[in-house]
Structure formats: C-alpha cells, structure tokens
Image (spheres, helix red, strand yellow):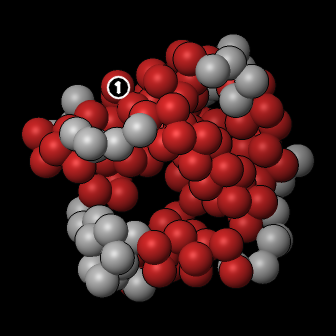
Amino acid sequence: MSDADRVFQSYGRSCNNPAFYEDFYNNFMQKSPEIRAMFVNTNMEAQRALLRGGIMWLVMHARGLPDTKIRALGESHSRDKMNINPMYYGMWVDALMETLQKYDTEFSADLEQCWRRSLRPAIEMIQSMY
C-alpha cells in the first residue's frame, strides 16, 4: 500500500471525532505564543471546519489530486493575505502528528513518516507562495 493510501486511511480513522480538531488546535497553539495570538479573534468552530477540509486537500493532493486547492491555500496564507510565516508549518505538522497519535489506533512511527513524506510537497508549495 502506498504512503498516500496509508495516510488516507489514517485520516479516515481520525477525522470523524470532532474532538480531533479541537485537540489539534490545542496542540498547535501550545507550540508558541505567536501561534496563539493568531487565533485570538477567530471563530474556532468555523476554523475547525476549514481545517477538516484543508487536511483532506493535503491528503488528496498526496493521492494525485491536482494542486489547485493547495495553491489556493498558499495564496490565502501568503504574506499579502493572512501572512502566515512559513516557519509555522513545521509546528503545524508536528501538532497534526501529536493529534493523529491520539486518535488513530493504528498510528506508529512508520505511519508518522508516511504522513510527513506525503504532506511535504504540498506544505513546501504553500510555504513557497509566502
């Protein structure tokens, strides 16, 4: 089974629990005060819904979906729009791995590496659009 297929199945085991997205943002915001500050005036319910779709776009891109949605994410997160510094994406991926470890009963070090390999091209594309 390919990395992308393993990642797709892993996300499927994790994403149906609404607490997954709450825990993700708790993990992510613990990474730095700057990250916490970015979400001070954010409707977190809406943000969690956006995250659900965003992760799916990353997963589907790894499975061969064209990069249209990834480029849209890159544009919306660019310096001229939301101004999300590229240095935060590593912390974002780390928070995702911590959350997956809690919610995916089949999570392992090997599966974590599949996730990281699968997400890297899309994350690098988003970062390059800063």
Tell whether 79 sits left or right of 103.
left
Is residue 104 visible to the viewer in this orientation of the structure?
no
Spot occupied by residue 57 in the image (x, y as percentages of width and height): 69, 59
Q: Is residue 19 visible?
A: yes
Q: Is residue 124 left or right of residue 3?
A: left
The residue positioned 43% from the left and 47% from the top of the image is: 93
How many numbered discs sit on the rendered protein? 1
* 115 on left or right of 29: right
When the figure is inspected, residue 13 is found, relative to residue 35, above or below; the finding is above
Q: Quadrant of the C terminus?
A: bottom left
Query: Which residue is farthest left?
Result: 33
The residue at the point 28 percent across, 80 percent down is 79
Position above or below: 64 against 57: below
Amino acid on which disc 1 is placed: Asn
Q: Nearer the viewer, residue 127 or 35?
A: 35
User: Callout 1 environment at 10 Å: few (<14), some (14 to 19), or many (20+)?
Assistant: some
Q: Residue furthest right?
A: 1
Is 49 placed left or right of 7 in the picture? Answer: left
Which x, y percent locates residue 100?
A: 57, 28
Which residue does the image show at 67% across and 50% down from the upper left? 53
The residue shown at (83%, 49%) is 5
Q: Is residue 104 above or below residue 32?
A: above
Residue 113: % across, % down: 56, 45
Residue ID for mark 1:
26
Q: Residue 68: name its quadrant.
A: bottom right
Query: Measured from the top left, where is residue 12 in percent x and y?
Result: 79, 32
Label 1 sits on a secondary structure element that is helix
Along the viewing direction, whichever of 128 and 47 lies nearer the viewer = 47
